[in-house]
Amino acid sequence: MKWIAICTAVLSLTAFNLSAETAGDDYDVIFAPSPQAPRAENGVIIGIQRYLEQTIAVGAFGTILTREGADDWTQAQVPTSVLLTSVHYVDANTIWATGHDGVLLRSLDAGQSWQRMMDGYQLLDLELAWLEAREAYLTARLEDAEDDDEAFEFEYLLDELSFQTDAAGIQQQVGPTKPFLDIHFIDQDHGFAVGAYGLLLETRDAGESWSVENDRLENPTAFHLNKLVSNEAGDLFIIGEAGQLFRSVDEGQAWEILDSPYHGSLFGGLFDQQGRLWVYGLRGNVFVSDDNGDSFIAVDANTRYNLNSGTVMADGTVVLAGHSGTLVFFTADSLDAQRYEHSSNVPLSGVLQNAGNELTLVGRSGIMQFMYPAVAAR
Amino acid sequence: MTQSTGKFAQGRASLAENLLFRFRALWLVGFAVVTAFLLYNAVQVRPDASFNKMIPENHEFIQNFYEYQDDLASLGNAIRVSVETTEGTIFDAEYQDILRQVTDELSYIPGVNRSQIRSIWTPNVRWSEVTEEGFVGGPVIPDTYDGSEESLQQLRQNVLRSGEVGNLVANNFQSALIYVPLNEINPETGEQLDYAEFSQNLEALVRDQYSSAQINIQIVGFAKVVGDLIEGANQVGMFFVLAMIITFIMLFLYSRCVRSSLIVLLCSGIAVIWQLGIIHLIGSGINPYSMLVPFLVFAIGVSHGVQIINAVMANRVDGADKVLASRYAFRGLYVAGLTALASDAIGFTTLMVIDIAVIKELAIAASIGVAVIVLTNLGLLPILTSYLDVSKRGLNYLDSKIHGEHPVVRTFSRFATRKWAIGAIAVSIVMAMFGLYKGQQQEIGDLDSGAPELRADSRYNLDNAFMVENYSASTDIFVVMAETAPGQCIAYDNMALMDRFQWHMENVEGVQAVRSIVYASKMGMAGINEGNLKWYSVNRDDFVINASISQAPGGLVNRDCSMAPIIIYLNDHKAQTLNRVVDNVRAFAADYPSDELNLMLAAGNSGIEAATNKVIETAQLEMLIWVYSVVIALCLLTFRSIRTVICIVLPLMFTTIMSQALMAGLGIGVKVATLPVIALGVGIGVDYGIYIYSKMREALREGLSLADSYEYALTKTGKAVGFTGLTLAIGVATWIWSPIKFQADMGILLTFMFLWNMLGALILIPALAHVLKVGPKDAKKGTDKA
């Protein structure tokens, strides 16, 4: 193997610029820089967002692509190779991305360069500290319990917590496994990240430091938290596994659990131009609330495929994108679904409107286009 | 190569001649007995299309492939049968009925691994869906299927959620596939799968039985290629008959003597019988490549036989009786014949530098063939003429032709004069420059899509094109074997590295897609997370990895989990593409050295082809150096003159250059089939030069000018050289119509080389001799060997 090492040394000096920690046996997907890939646009792309003229897309192997207007996509240098799951603009220059293995990324130069602000190893330390504190807290409350009902409740919570403690133990052995699934900033400094197994993190210093705040949600079973959205008033909503819906009207300090219309998983949510909250998920289930989440009505999306993501077009049309290339359109004020299938038939995980009726889609086979027929076809 | 005029060949009878003719009756009996014995063996020769012999077995890639051959078997040896409807879609009761029947029919064909067969009619093809309650699923064909509109609707829905669109169901819903894995070894009888029989069964029981105006059947897979190859190879037998008939006509036109024409055919035929018989005795078979050898042996036999007949006739015209005429013919020719045959044999032997079994077999078979020609056509043939004589008609014809200038002489003698010599050389230089330029575009390996062994418009390749168009899988597959410690093939660290490797390869130009256990695991991760693409990632937890691959198709890890094939689907199998893939695998392995994970090259049809290309590429130059060294050495030995060697070898090189240009022009790559052709062309081509130059030198020694000497040589051998060139060309030209593409390529190239070599010798040898100022003085030195 000596010659291989020599070759590597030579190669790393020339074209490949590898640091020791990325090579071979020491390869850790968290720290390995994202490979520059000629076909990055055709890889797995999960998240897509736009801010003014810039569009950004993130996906597998730490791929982050940006473009101005309708220019070509350029791939950024990214210090991780994990699967990136979402992207969020704080302002034109400050962008956040979430990823697997507890990775959070931040760019301060409009997506050109990125720093790891959190990785799974750091997250694990935070979680362990939080679990310990939480366990101590619940144990104390159990001891102080005034009646059997209260005791039972804390026993239950402790029991559920022990699963998380076990999971953390496994992570200590095998390495970090929890993905972040979404991120949202209220302002430059104050933001939240959500993830698998009930993960809720908060920062108040622009992401320099984070705290685990899982217990702000009534989520003892630690369901995955898939999506964070806010309305114009600044109310925050968390949408998650098994129909979990949480709302906060005080910038994420207190969260109330909403009466969910569905017990299957919800993957996304959005506010339309009328201020209605749309949530959608497994098997084509779509629900709309015009009272800020207090009540929902079911909408027939005319599909049984999962709906993963959505956007509101300039004319107010709501578009939901899902599996098997499914695109469902609801023109403003209408709850009648017009269903189309993108020819790729792949799972779609993001959708954005370009000029006119052209949509940019992202999914398992990368970045794709779709032209929405202006006149309803069916 | 004499055509004696006036005087009998000089000299005393050699020992060989005396041995042969004193006991000629005994020899005849001996030949008859040996021929009978070898004929008995020859008819037992079987076509042998062994896959292993067509690949460079000692190459690193192939060694690696052999190590895991059993583990990779489940990936490889399967056929795919598509049932296409020309009316409407597959969601039709009648169509489904036929699809079910074809599926059943296939499962009863011997060689089929019945339990693994997959189509939408087999219970192992299921749909599944994530619901609020978890996974639900069932067989794609509804349990309640009755052909009604509702059940067809249900079927359609099941197909859509089965994920089989593009796999078992065509993207346009007009055809559906049956995936049929084969047992190479019959588990009950232990017998090897008979590809020819299997292929015939497919044709008769499936294609013929179910094809109709509404239904088309397409069949692809390695077993079908081999079956078609064997079937195509059998047709080559017909070409042999055709070549014999044409040769007989040529012989007759040449000699106007049925008897001697038949003698030549008989002796050459006996040479072929001996060659095949010996091949069988040494335990070898005949493969689609070495099938060329009987043709060559026959053609070389005829071209030498015709010299003997020629001489016998000339001697008879001059008045000798049939025995003496035969004796003198033998006396005058056996040294020259042996020299020419030796050059052929040595030329063939240089093929041994190519480390591919079929080419070595071809070299051995050809060497044996040439060796037996020495006995049959230099030995048996004059004995036969000493008994049977030649016909009066032939003698009269020869007598009438001896006087008067032959058109060959008239046409070519002018090339020994200044104006024509310089003109010819100038034209040749221009052509050679063009040839060199064009030859640079020559490519290594097979260039056509589909099964390159077969013609582009063959049934197989049409079927293959149909599959590529309607289903989502390339047929050019390159497999990298990711080797780990036993049990570690799905350990996270290895999976993570494989994942990155897979992405690296997916970014290589020419790569369509990469599939492996990592891909299956990531799909499984999304699957167990309700299809959410945000989970499309390898998990660090080995328990989770195990869960993620619980639904993975078989064959993605081996039995003891020490190897996971990474299957790379390519756009094509051009050498450039294969090189790029190999280089990128190596670059990645160098960038990410690991003691845990060894990325081994290479399996899959494209991996094997990459190895073959590498071997061919190095062997090409090596073989050319060898064959030219041998030819140059042989010429130096015979003529002891550098200028002579230049005169003889330059036209050969010109032919080599032009044939490379021809290959580039016709899109024929340098491959297992065409590489030997270059050596054969040079080895046999040098004969012309030896014949012509030796006669020319005879005259030069007498003090004749170059122009006169060349005219003398042409008178003596010109007609024979022309005839030899044509016979050789015809012997191989019939191959051009072979259904097997590489045989056709061999036919085209050999025909071109034999004819071009002939013209090159007739035109360029005198022209070069003129320019190099070869004169009577040069001929004085050197031995009188040829």
Image (spheres, grey):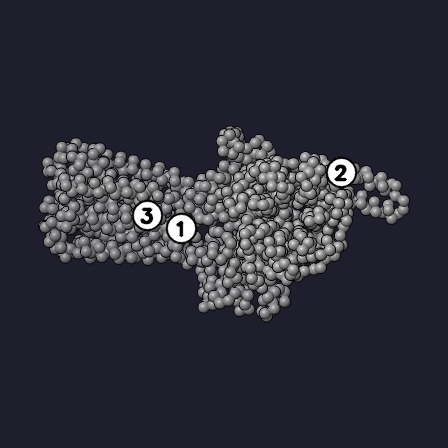
Mark 3 and mark 1 on one chain? yes
Q: Chain of mark 1?
A: B
Q: Mark 2 and 1 residues: CB-CB less than 8 Å, in contact? A: no
Where is the N terminus of chain B found, in terms of image quarters?
top left
**Residue, x 62% and y 39% (percent of image)?**
A94
Q: Which residue is mark 2?
A: A130
Q: Which residue is mark 1?
A: B448
Q: Chain of mark 2?
A: A
* Kind of residue at badge 1: Asp
Q: Position of residue B627 (x, y in %)?
A: 31, 38
* Kind of residue at badge 3: Gly
Spatial distance from mark 3 to mark 1, Cα to Cα? 14 Å
Please give left or right for residue B363 compared with residue A25 in the image.
left
Q: Position of residue B38 (x, y in %)?
A: 33, 51
Secondary element at tag 2: helix
Q: Which residue is mark 3?
A: B665
Please give left or right for residue B640 compared with residue A236 in the image.
left
**Residue, x 85% and y 39% (percent of image)?**
A140
Closer-to-camera residue (B378/B176): B176
Vertically, is B709 above or below A377?
Answer: above
Q: Mark 3 and 2 residues: CB-CB less than 8 Å, in contact? A: no
Looking at the image, the residue that sits furthest to the bottom is B148
